[in-house]
Amino acid sequence: MNKARREIEEVMTQVDIVIEVLDARIPDSSQNPMLNTLRGDVPVLRLLNKKDLADKSRLDLWLEHWRGSETVLAHPFSTLDKADVAKVSQWVSQMVPHRGSAEKPIRAMIAGIPNVGKSSLMNALLGRRVAKVGDEPAVTKSQQKLKVTNGFQILDTPGILWPKIENPDASYRLAVTGAVRATAINYEDVALVGLTFFIADYLDSLVTRYKLKEISADPYEVLKVIGSKRGALRAGGKVDMHKAAEVFLNDVRTGAIGPYVMETPEMIAHEERLVEEAKAKKEAERKARLAAAVPQRQQASNRAYRDAQVMDQTELTDQAQTIKQDENTDDKQ
């Protein structure tokens, strides 16, 4: 992680614009806060990739949220849409009008968390396979500098997640959409979070996909029904909940369940307030523990001092008695 941070810091001094590839289904959770901090005033083109999997009405809320910012330009995007790919050079030129010639090419850094489509974007821009593409997170391992046109260069960076995701809800959204490796999550837990969301926000999608006549408000019960309908069964007809979770999450990630967006600007603002409140509470508790520990340490110090005084007094008394005994002995002699 520190190596990736150093790479981004080094590259940031050499680029005119950042092309940040986001997952259109989680426009905020798929951002890297570290990148926002490191880019400073460098403009950013946010490509909300996988637009075909996203709910357009909710995606429009994000476009409106970012509209008006001088350093942010956002567009729904698909690496599979040739028209979208062709527009990238135009959007970049719009953000960096003072460069774009062969002598002064626009230098762009492509960045994004794992599994959002960075490598696919590079390959689409260049018209050839230069970056490994896969559906497993973090397949981009090293930095690459490539020429798109005489006036446009791109620099790739490794796909990274930040070291600590403070918002637990964001962590689960990343897991639901597949940005977190399968080995790092509990499929059943993630599926239950995803089902809770779909029951609340996209109930019709669930009903249509799994042909449900009625649906429980309990995501666990819904997952059992999905498992039974899709053949995720063990011997004796018992539902294999892990396999049922895999079936559901695969439908969610591939878009088989229908388009969706898991977050809105208003929702994220509320979650950020909760996170800040939790951090403030934790800090207050830490300070309270420190304050309580000071008197305890002082009391311990006072006891140690009193014990030392008693010991010193005892030693003085013993010495005085020894001297007196010696004097009595001399008198007798």
Image (tube, rainbow, N blue to C red):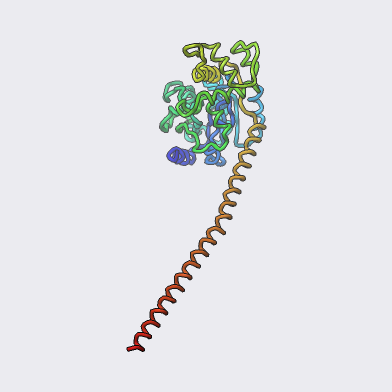
Picture coordinates of residue 42 (x, y %)? Answer: 55, 39
Q: Residue at x 58, y 16 (%)?
A: 257
Check the picture and name the quadrant holding the N terminus.
Answer: top left
Picture coordinates of residue 14 (x, y %)? Answer: 47, 39
Q: Is 166 left, or right, of 134 in this rendering?
A: right
The front one of 311 and 260 is: 311
Q: Is 36 left, or right, of 274 in this rendering?
A: left
Q: Residue at x 38, y 79 (%)?
A: 322
**Residue 28 seen:** yes
The front one of 214 and 85 is: 214
The front one of 3 and 67 is: 3
State which quadrant residue 176 falls in: top right
Picture coordinates of residue 267 (x, y %)? Answer: 65, 31
State which quadrant residue 88 falls in: top right
113 vs 333: above or below: above
270 vs 75: above or below: below
Picture coordinates of residue 28 (x, y %)? Answer: 59, 31
Check the picture and name the quadrant holding the C terminus.
Answer: bottom left
Question: Which residue, as the protein is rendered here, is positioned at the far left?
Answer: 333
How many labels, in total?
0
**Residue 81 seen:** no
State which quadrant residue 81 falls in: top right
